[in-house]
Amino acid sequence: MARGEDIRDFGSGRTGMSNILRTGGGKSAAVVFVLDCSKGILAVLLARYTIGVGAPELVAGLAVLCGHNWPVFLRFRGGRGILPSLGTLAVMAPWVALAGAVLFIIITLSSRYLSLGSIVGVMFIALLSLALTLWWGHHQIYTVYVFVGGAVIIWQHRDNIRRLLNGTERRVGMPGLRN
């Protein structure tokens, strides 16, 4: 888009960081990483300090996720929601977010599939959040957020899941081709 082209015309057709990485390079992807995480962080902090903890944070987090995935001004063609969700979770449950991010990095580096790292990371965060809620009384509302948001993210990755199963998913380092 900085060069006058629409990022949705390349690679996955999404506006997320992985497509930016493939088509625009590392510097552009780093900017998208910061901006996408920041919108999740800011939305939850705004909800927390203006309305309260718990349900307002859940609503803010889901609103950011939906706005990222289905932006009205881009004709409902956005990203998959990983980074805004990471930002929201970094405020709601920082240790859970950190554990999921570490697993994402390990899976992505070892497999070279960003989508696999994302999917496994989301599933791990859901299981970890559930375990923390059941055994240590972790905030239930955050677990609800993780499961609802996680389901949305997995749904957004359904084409990646098909390609992973078919052996046609692009690995990190493979260029994003014009659609």
Image (cartoon, helix red, strand yellow):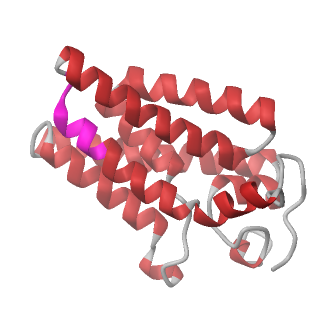
Q: Residue furthest front?
A: 165
Give the quadrant of the N terminus: bottom right
Q: Nearer the viewer, residue 3 or 131?
A: 131
Q: Residue at x 69, y 26 (%)?
A: 106
Q: Nearer the viewer, residue 67 or 45?
A: 67
Give the quadrant of the C terminus: bottom right
Q: Which residues are the magenta region?
A: 138-145
Q: Residue at x 87, y 70 (%)?
A: 177
Q: Residue at x 40, y 58 (%)?
A: 65
User: Residue 101 lies in magenta, yes or no?
Assistant: no
Quadrant of the rendered image containing residue 23: bottom right
Quadrant of the rendered image containing residue 59: bottom left
Q: Would residue 25 appear left or right of 95 to someone viewing this image?
A: right
Q: Position of residue 80 (x, y in %)?
A: 54, 59
Q: Position of residue 83 (x, y in %)?
A: 52, 46
Q: Residue furthest top?
A: 136
Q: Position of residue 141 (x, y in %)?
A: 18, 39
Q: Would residue 43 appear left or right of 153 to someone viewing this image?
A: left
Q: Position of residue 67 (x, y in %)?
A: 40, 66
Q: Is residue 140 above or below residue 153?
A: above
Q: How many numbered marks, from 0 up?
A: 0
Q: Residue at x 9, y 46 (%)?
A: 51
Q: Magenta span: helix, strand or loop, mainly?
A: helix
Q: Is residue 108 above or below residue 136?
A: below
Q: Residue furthest left?
A: 51
Q: Residue furthest bottom?
A: 75
Quadrant of the rendered image containing residue 121: top right
